[in-house]
Structure formats: C-alpha cells, structure tokens
Image: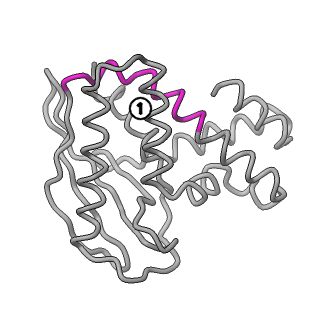
Amino acid sequence: MNRRSFIAAVVASFAIAPMVPSTAHALTESRAKVLVDTLVADINKTISSGKSESAMIRDFERIFARYSDTSYISAYAIGADGRRANKSQKGAFSKAFQSYVANKYGSRFREFIGGQLEVKGVRKVKTWYEVSTLAKLRGQSPFEVTFQVSDRTGKDLFFNMFIEGINLLLTERTEIGAMIDRNGGNIDKMIKDLKKLS
C-alpha cells in the first residue's frame, strides 16, 4: 500500500474536473464542510465495511455519482473531442466513464483497509471553497487531499481534487485522449472500448 495506489483509488470517488465553475449561488463555508464531512464518512465506511470487492466497486460508483458533478467531469475528461460528440454520445460516454473509473480504481479498495480521511479546514477561493483533508494510511506519513466545492448545478458538489498539489483528473483526461487517438478519433469506438474496461 502506497501513496500512488491511494491516489488512484480515491480519484474514482471524486474524479473532479480542474476547471473553475461558471457560477455560484449561496454556497457557504459550512455547507462545503458538511459535504466533505459526509463524503469522508461514506468513504471511510466503505473502506472498513469488509464487503466483497464487487460490492465495494458498486459503492465506489455510487459515491462518485452522489458527490461529484458527473456531467462536468465527463465533459472535461473527453476534452476538445466533446465538441464534435452528439448528445447521445455525450450521454453514453458519461455513463461509461463513471463505470470505468469505479471499476478501475474500486478494485484497489482492499488495499486501504485501515486508512482514513479527516477533514482539517475550509477556505473560500473566489466563488468556490477549498476543503482540506488529511489522508492517514497505516505505515504511511499523512498527506493532504484538497477538494474544491461549487454549487454551480444548484447542488453542492466537488468539481476538482488535488493530492499534494497534483490534479488527479488530468491523468484520466490524458488516458481518454489516448484512447480516442487509438481509435482514429472515432468516439463511438472509444466508448465501446471504455465499456469493456468497466
């Protein structure tokens, strides 16, 4: 168990797009903290649940869908190629991407038994809030995980996450881009390949 594998597993739950939200409504420091507190409790509960790997993967996907701005995330992950995707393709990609990250990283859940995330502080940044947490794993030095929270959709959701300053979704955007390239730019074939990995 190491930091790299922890980062890989956690990103599935949050996989949040590294872009500034276009608008914000009445989000407050208290609401941002409540969201992260609830999310952290959900993650910690799943980590220590003793469930089977397949059940943990299902929980991982549920967590991802519940706490993150999935439409925003998938739009960022597909990048510029999303401009030429039709509505049906965008919907299919968003669904496949959610299952893909849950399956890809959820299978690593067993490695984090005994680990824990602890909320440490909240600060306002422009129109959103950053919530800092401390990741504590057995046999590892604690390290910081920072979540950016917005209510641009009308709900309090995460739109970005950093671990020790590293933006995690960029990795997935790179991988999706590479997958599109391998399929000669064909979005439908990329989605089909993505589903095979889910």
Q: Which residues are magenta?
A: 99-114
Q: Could you tell me residue 9's position as x and y percent? A: 40, 31
Query: In the drawing, does residue 140 fall left or right of residue 34?
Result: left
Foreground residue among 115 and 174: 115
Query: In the drawing, does residue 113 fall left or right of residue 77?
Result: left
Residue appearing at x 27%, y 70% in the figure: 31
Query: In the drawing, does residue 176 fall left or right of residue 146?
Result: right
Q: Could you tell me residue 122's position as x and y percent? A: 20, 65
Element type at marker 1? helix
Residue appearing at x 26%, y 74% in the figure: 124
Q: Badge 1 local density, few (<14 within 10 Å), some, or many (20+)?
A: some
Protein image colouring = one colour
What is the chief secondary structure element of the magenta stretch? helix
Residue 176 image-quadrant placement: top right
Foreground residue among 134 and 88: 88
Query: In the drawing, does residue 41 fall left or right of residue 53?
Result: left
Q: Could you tell me residue 132's position as x and y percent? A: 22, 56
Residue appearing at x 28%, y 64% in the figure: 130
| Quadrant location, the N terminus | top left
Residue appearing at x 52%, y 71% in the figure: 153
Q: Which residue type does callout 1 highlight?
A: Ala
Relative to 141, does residue 2 appear above or below in the rendering?
Answer: above
Report which residue position mark 1 lands on.
Answer: 8
Residue 195 image-quadrant placement: top right
Q: Could you tell me residue 157's position as x and y percent? A: 42, 62
Relative to 57, does residue 178 appear above or below in the rendering?
Answer: below
